[in-house]
Image (tube, grey):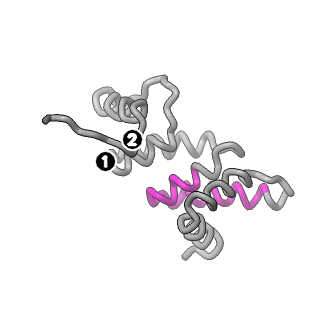
Amino acid sequence: SGKIEITDASAITMENILFYIYHEDLKEDDVSIVDLLIQAEKYAIADLVNMCVKILKENLSEENVVDVMTAAFLTNQEDLFELAYEFIFKSRIDKQTVGVEAWKELEEKKPTLAFQMLKKAMFKL
């Protein structure tokens, strides 16, 4: 039929991937860099992966740290994963509750993934 259905990414994410392929830049749309990283890794677009990792490192925050850590884990971005879990650990030392709700949601929806990430963050396994 000449039709390809992509069900694991939003239209905006795929539009940005295609835009990147043709222009080597990102559109200014409201794209999730976390989602873009996952898809760039899936389709082996190394330069886009590197761009996403750089953007995520520069914009790591209390609001996105669990999503960034999850994407880093799923895409084997060791430096980004380490940066994210260190951000959480340092915040916990300062008695802040960074990412608690996001983590609870991840644990509820994907308990095996949450356990694997915690094991890797705590024991580097």
- Could you say whether the residue bearing mark 2 is in a helix, strand or loop? helix
Quarter of the figure with residue 14: top left
Residue 106: % across, % down: 61, 57
* Residue 29 shown left or right of residue 2 in the figure: right
Q: Nearer the viewer, residue 42 or 60?
A: 42
Residue 59: % across, % down: 62, 40
Residue 21 is labelled as none
- Could you say whether the residue bearing mark 1 is in a helix, strand or loop? loop
Total numbered badges shown on the rendered structure: 2
* Residue 91 shown left or right of residue 53 in the figure: right
**Residue positioned 69% across, 43% down in the render:** 63
Q: CA distance from mark 1 to mark 2?
A: 10 Å
**Residue positioned 32% across, 41% down in the render:** 6
Which stretch is magenta? 68-91
Q: Amino acid at mark 1?
A: Tyr
Q: Give the residue at the far left of this rendering.
A: 1
Residue 95: % across, % down: 86, 57
**Residue positioned 51% across, 60% down in the render:** 73
Magenta stretch: helix, strand or loop mostly: helix
**Residue positioned 42% across, 30% down in the render:** 12
Q: Nearer the viewer, residue 11 or 63?
A: 11
Residue depth check, mark 1 versus mark 2: number of the one nearer the observer? 1
- Split into 4 quadrants, where in the image is the C terminus? bottom right
Magenta stretch encompasses residue 89: yes
Residue 43 is labelled as 1
Residue 77: % across, % down: 48, 57
* Residue 2 shown left or right of residue 35 in the figure: left
Q: Amino acid at mark 2?
A: Leu
> Few, some or many C-alpha atoms within 10 Å of disc 1 (few <14, some 14-19, many ≥20)?
few
Residue 48 is labelled as 2
